[in-house]
Image (cartoon, grey):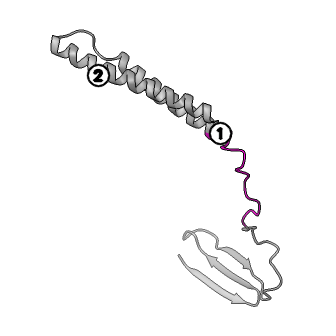
Amino acid sequence: MILNNTHSAGTISSSAALRNDAVPVKNTLLFSQNQSQPLTHQPDRSLPTEEPDHSTGSCKECLYTGVLTCSGVSLYFLKLASEVPEQGTKEMLRQATKQKRFLLGGSALWAAAGAYRMYLG
């Protein structure tokens, strides 16, 4: 790639061949010599001046996201509890009962967390 950069008063130019058979492309960037005169084509990069109002509590999107997340985890635990095998040896059934109890408890815990999140608003 061949680059020919030139600098003249008020402009910077660059000609570059993108490929061997391509036509050279000329890019020009304008800038101001006078610092008190802003550019007309300069993008606005200023930060927003207004602060968001947090006095009313959390936003509705955050509320719904929290409730749906807790509900989803609760339903996932419930699904896993329904997949625990109910047949097998006595030792397997005892382990399955423990797993099912744990998964149902986790499902209830996450459901309660979602309900509490909804209550908090």
92 or 40: nearer the eye?
A: 92
Q: Are marks 2 and 1 in contact (CB under 8 Å)?
A: no
Percent from the top left, x then y, of residue 111? 49, 26
Mark 2 / mark 1, whichever is N-terminal: 1
Separation of residues labelled 2 and 1 (CA atoms): 34 Å
Query: How would you classify the magenta stretch by its main secondary structure?
Result: loop
Position of residue 38 measured from the top left corner of the image (x, y, whole percent): 81, 79
Pick the quarter of the image with the C terminus.
top right
Q: Which of the 4 quarters of the picture holds residue 85?
A: top left
The amino acid type of the residue labelled 2 equals Gln
In the displayed structure, would residue 13 be above or below residue 106?
Answer: below
Q: Of helix, strand and loop, which one carries label 2?
A: helix
Q: Where is 79 relative to 67, above or below?
A: above
Position of 117 relative to 29 (above/below)? above
Q: Is residue 48 magenta?
A: yes
> Which residue is labeled 2 in the image?
99
- Write the residue at 62% across / 41% down: 62
Determine which of the numbered discs, if any, sits on residue 61 in the image: 1
**Residue at (44, 23) in percent of width and height:** 108
Compared across the picture, whether 95 is left or right of 65 comes to: left
Identify the residue at horizontal 50%, vertical 27% (top origin).
112
Query: Measured from the top left, where is residue 82 in percent x and y?
Result: 37, 16
Tell me the amino acid under the disc marked 1: Glu
Left or right for 100, reference 120: left
- What number is the disc on residue 48? none
Residue range in magenta is 47-62
Q: Position of residue 28 (x, y in %)?
A: 72, 77
Give residue 12's quadrant in the image. bottom right
In the rendered image, residue 12 lying in the magenta stretch gets the answer no
Callout 2: few (<14), some (14-19), or many (20+) C-alpha neighbours within 10 Å?
A: some
Is residue 117 or residue 27 the one in the foreground? Answer: 117
